[in-house]
Image: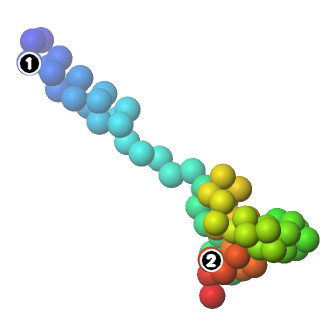
Amino acid sequence: MFFHVPTALLLIAITITQVKMDPLEAAPPECKDLAPEPTCKQWKNSESCGNRLLEPDFYCRKTCNYCA
């Protein structure tokens, strides 16, 4: 019984620490904007494409030149 406890704890620790990727956080495969065109143009004109809080690399990939 004593020898099984460390093994069980190790398996629990490995299970808890596994990283799961959220599909909503993945970048879209196509080079297109997900936000409306006026929003992306406004971000580009106001130099907000570099603002990581707005996530322009996800919402305005095309307009902010994050893809080809």
Q: Residue at x 69, y 68 (%)?
A: 49
Q: Which of 17 and 9 lies nearest the eye of the viewer?
A: 17
Return the x and y of residue 9 as percentages of the image width and height: 23, 23
Q: Quadrant of the C terminus?
A: bottom right
**Residue lying furthest right:** 38
Looking at the picture, tell me which residue is in the foreground, 7 or 66: 66
- Where 23 falls versus 18 (above or below)? below
Question: Residue 3's spot in the image, x, y percent?
Answer: 8, 18
Discs 2/1, front = 2
Q: Nearer the viewer, residue 57 or 52?
A: 52
Quarter of the picture containing the N terminus is top left
Would you name the residue on which mark 1 appears? 3
Q: Is 7 left, or right, of 57 in this rendering?
A: left
Residue 59 visible here: yes
Residue 54 coordinates in the image, percent (x, y): 71, 56
Give whichever of discs 2 and 1 has the lower sequence position: 1
Q: Is residue 14 found left or right of 67 in the rendered image?
A: left
Tell me the kind of residue under disc 1: Phe
Q: Position of residue 51 (x, y in %)?
A: 66, 60
What residue sits right under mark 2 in the picture?
A: 66
Q: Is residue 46 above or below residue 10?
A: below
